[in-house]
Image: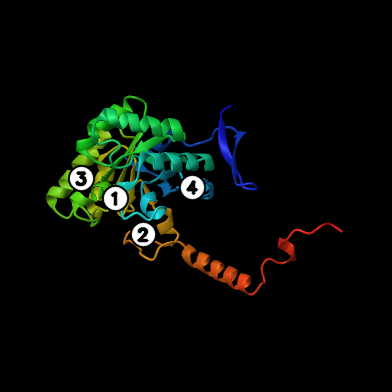
Amino acid sequence: MSTTFTLDTATSRANPTPAPMKRLTVPAIQRRKADGRTAEPLVMLTAYTARQAQLLDAHCDMLLVGDSLGQVIYGLPSTLSVTLDMMIAHGAAVVRGSYHSLVLVDMPFGAYEASPQQAFASASRIMAETGAAGVKLEGGTAIAETIAFLSQRGIPVMGHIGLTPQAVNALGGYGARGKSEAEHAKILADARAVADAGAFGLVIEGVMEDIAIAVTDSVSIPVIGIGASVHCDGQVLVTEDMLGMFDRVPRFVKRFDDIAGVIDRAAQTYAADVRARAFPTDDQVYRPKK
């Protein structure tokens, strides 16, 4: 019997609790795509904390500890300032807070581009220090050698092509990719190179829909879309975007709730109660028992 870490919500502390390991595995995710199609689309959301992972876990097949945490958690202008230590800290928290979902951790900018050896050093740290099932990295044909190097050494890799946020400066912004025939061909070539290199899955982001369909149909590995197509083998969103935590809503996001509004109203009510001395009440203070 294996053990995993579960979160004791009564104390908000992570405690090692013996439990049968029932996590989805990389082979299980791969098997969801059979004969070129996925009958039930794969569900992926981002997670950055143990409690967030705990709430999302039952509903997802995969949880991605995305380098989007740079913007979502730390208020940075892009993902480029995210460090390996940041990804490891949040990755470990998400693994502790989850039980069912396969957890992947983004490789941050600068942690893998120099050489396959650098990528292995970074990825092995992530795997050892977080307990995650694999890593995700951006790039196509240029990074295929690195994907092969990692895969051959036992590190599962999910690729990421199309709009790649770590290359935002080179791309000239966050606009959709694939509007020209040359770019269409490059993205398709990137997908095939990533799949041929041994990646077990692929995220395709911010591309024209016909490209997303062509990529999904042309590779045997699951293709997870974000700003791509419903035809993909699964979908991923930044959880905070999906929950309505921010005012700006990217075109490819559907808000499934208004959590920002819920928090604003709760904080307003709390502030009013404090100022009116209506909180705390007898129910929230300690007094000697009679």
| Circle 4 crowding by C-alpha within 10 Å: few under 14, some 14–19, many from 20 | many
Contact check, label 3 and label 4, Cβ < 8 Å: no
Q: Which amino acid is tagged 3?
A: Ile
Who comes first in sequence, dot 2 or dot 3?
3
Query: Which-is-in-front pick, marks 4 and 1?
Result: 4
User: Amino acid under label 2?
Assistant: Val
The picture places residue 217, in percent across and down from the top left corner, at 27, 43
- In the picture, measured across the screen, residue 169 lies left or right of residue 61, that is left
Q: N-terminal of the two: label 3 or label 1?
A: 3
Q: Quadrant of the N terminus?
A: top right
Badge 2 or badge 1: first in the primary sequence: 1
| Circles 4 and 2 in contact, beta carbons < 8 Å | no
Alpha-carbon distance for marks 2 and 1? Answer: 12 Å
- Viewer-side label of 3, 4: 4
Residue carrying label 1: 205
Which secondary structure, mark 1?
strand
Q: Which residue is mark 3?
A: 187
- Look at mark 2 in the image and give the residue it sits on: 253
Q: Secondary structure at mark 4?
A: loop
Task: Identify the residue position indicated by label 4 in the image.
Answer: 49
Instruction: Name the residue at the right extreme.
Output: 290
**Cα distance between the residues tagged 3 and 4:** 33 Å
Alpha carbon separation for disc pair 3 and 1: 11 Å
Residue 101 is situated, as x and y percent measured from the top left of the image, at: 48, 41
Q: Residue at x 17, y 55 (%)?
A: 179
